[in-house]
Image (cartoon, helix red, strand yellow):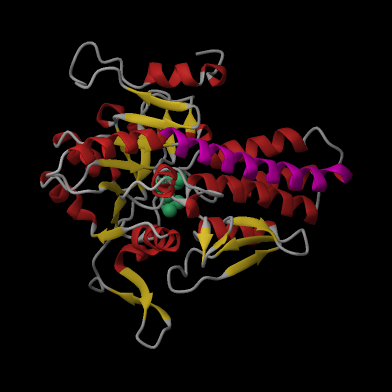
Amino acid sequence: MNVQGKALRTIFLADDDWRVTIIDQTVLPHQFQLLHLSSLSDMATAISDMQVRGAPLIGAAASYGMALAMREDASDTMLVNAYNTLLATRPTAVNLHWALNEMKAVLVTLSEDQREQAAYQKAAELCDEDVAICSAIGDHGLPLIESLWQAKEKKASSEQRVNILTHCNAGWLATVDWGTALSPIYKAHNAGIPVHVWVDETRPRNQGFNLTAWELGQHGVPHTIVVDNVGGHLMQHGQVDMCIVGTDRTTRTGDVCNKIGTYLKALAAFDNHIPFYVALPSPTIDWSIRDGVADIPIEERSSREVTHIVGRTQQGNIQEIQIAPDNSAAINYGFDVTPARLITGLITERGVASRTVNNVNSKDDAGLEAPLAQLFSDKLPKNR
Ligand code: MRU
């Protein structure tokens, strides 16, 4: 995607060909700052402090974290330590486990002197794969937007744009390139379809207004920021044609764990008969679990993210201020689970897994499990 008119990925090697360059997402949209990471500990901190975030990018970053670790020390002890350190950075996004397992599978078979080079090579491959997957998600999501646009174009009374609501940041910044939820939107915009995005602010980290609004702006996609509670109202007034969100972990039955607040958007969309799609790369599917509410670990972050907010002062400095009373307790759940029954379809790199009937209360509704399994029959665990 473009930053100041130039195509850029969110993670790449520095000019010295070994340090890992990332965009510091904690200072966007006020500053665009690249950071060069040179150790396992730099990468673990970057992931846990959310300098890089978003499920696919967390996976990509962890794979380069393994490469940096192998450069420091390619012993078996370091391999185990790096795997465990990176795994502990964020609990919910399953792409982290997936990427670390991919790296480990390659590295354990090699001697110490082969590991550094192989780790860099595998990390680069995983990043390229993420770009291809996210681009394909865009290609499969585009026809959904196209058909909404064709229907609207025919009705002279309709507003002549497709209004799409998204939550959090599931865009280019959450992946290596393209994004998941935003990939179909970029493809539609590039194809000349007039799309307009409602950007949920996404308290408490504000990934919506800090990141989604910024990256849509960089690419010239029309958008409007709304506070988190506005979505239902917009839906009741015909202002939302579809919702597309990302996910950090999806069960084999199609339950979706995504940024806190996604569930409420899905409920409102369901009540207003608005299509609610989730865009996901297959490494985000956890085939080992069926019940998202019971089985997905929900990250709980510092309450300070709720009681304080970061912004730019009139003098141009980035500053944190307290917004809550001194002694009030606060709790900060990072994610929630949207049950598959509220989801219209899952947009994947292999196509869209959609329910076969519109009425989820119908006995004919087979849910999302069968369509998802059909797309990924080669990835289903053998013993289940
Ligand atoms: O806490 P974050 O910012 O890492 O959460 C990100 C999200 O919830 C995204 O929607 C999800 O990772 C999908 S990203 C393509």
- Residue 300 image offset from top left, x and y in percent: 39, 51
Tell me if residue 138 is in the magenta stretch: yes
Report the residue at 19% width, 21% height from top: 359
273 relative to 27, above or below: above
Kindly report the secondary structure that dominates the magenta region of the rendered protein: helix
- Residue 256 image offset from top left, x and y in percent: 36, 35
142 relative to 198, above or below: above
Report the residue at 53% width, 65% height from top: 24
- Would residue 133 appear left or right of 302 to someone viewing this image? right
Q: Nearer the viewer, residue 151 or 377?
A: 151
- Would residue 130 appear left or right of 250 to someone viewing this image? right
Q: Nearer the viewer, residue 178 or 158?
A: 158
Magenta span covers which residues?
A: 113-140
350 relative to 23, above or below: above
- Would residue 195 appear left or right of 49 to someone viewing this image? left
- Residue 337 image offset from top left, x and y in percent: 32, 37
Residue 236 placement: quadrant: top left
Tell me if residue 23 is in the magenta stretch: no
Number of callouts: 0
- Would residue 166 appear left or right of 87 to someone viewing this image? left
Residue placed furthest toward the bottom: 315
- Residue 84 image offset from top left, x and y in percent: 63, 45
Residue 230 placement: quadrant: bottom left
Q: Nearer the viewer, residue 161 or 203?
A: 161
85 relative to 32, above or below: above
